[in-house]
Image (cartoon, grey):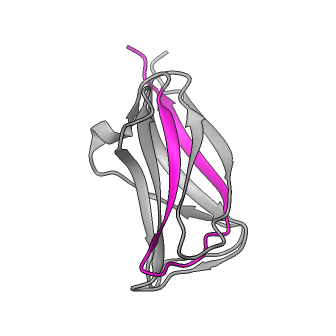
């Protein structure tokens, strides 16, 4: 077989109700070598982006050691970048193809970080789609 085999995992991420606080949550351990092909975020309630005081969400590959910093996908909730409760919001993937490659055992972390005084993050569902890498 030559067709890629894809997998989607959906993970609940907790809220960060305090606008000026950050929250990092380990959400997934890659069971096999794969390439991330899509990441979406469905929030419990709406987020209305704002300039100066905003929030950025990032999916990071910590590697097998748990200390890596490879950014897989990121989205800044600035003015005009909003969510609607329950609707999937596409998170922009890294433009560096190597950043999307996972090894078996890599730990993925969801980071919700305030900018300025921040805005709240209601939490919700992160969906990560991967295609298995077969050598």
- Identified at 47% across, 78% down, the residue is 54
In the image, residue 100 above or below residue 89: above
Examine the structure image and report whether residue 116 is included in the region drawn in magenta.
yes
- Identified at 53% across, 28% down, the residue is 30
- Identified at 43% across, 17% down, the residue is 134
In the image, taking residue 22 as reference, residue 115 lies left or right, namely: left
Magenta stretch: dominant SS? Answer: strand
Q: What stretch is highlighted in magenta?
A: 106-135
In the image, residue 59 above or below residue 31: below
In the image, residue 9 above or below residue 20: above
In the image, taking residue 93 as reference, residue 45 lies left or right, namely: right
Q: Where is residue 111 in the image (x, y as percent from the top left)?
A: 50, 55
Work out whether residue 122 or residue 43 is closer to the camera in this orientation and state it.
122
Work out whether residue 108 or residue 10 is closer to the camera in this orientation and state it.
108
In the image, residue 43 above or below residue 94: below
Q: Quadrant of the C terminus?
A: top left
Examine the structure image and report whether residue 130 is included in the region drawn in magenta.
yes
């Amino acid at each position: 077989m030559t067709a890629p085999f894809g997998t989607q995992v959906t993970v609940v991420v907790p809220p960060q109700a305090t606008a000026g606080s950050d929250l990092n949550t380990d959400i997934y351990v890659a069971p096999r070598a794969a390439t991330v092909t899509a990441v979406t975020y469905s929030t419990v309630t709406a987020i209305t982006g704002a300039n100066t005081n905003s929030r950025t969400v990032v999916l990071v590959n910590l590697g097998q050691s748990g200390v890596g910093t490879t950014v897989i996908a990121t989205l800044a909730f600035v003015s005009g970048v909003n969510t609607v409760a329950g609707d999937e919001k596409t998170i922009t993937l890294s433009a560096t193809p190597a950043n999307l490659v996972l090894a078996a055992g890599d730990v993925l972390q969801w980071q919700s970080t305030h900018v300025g005084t921040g805005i709240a993050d209601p939490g919700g569902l992160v969906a990560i789609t991967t295609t298995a890498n077969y050598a």
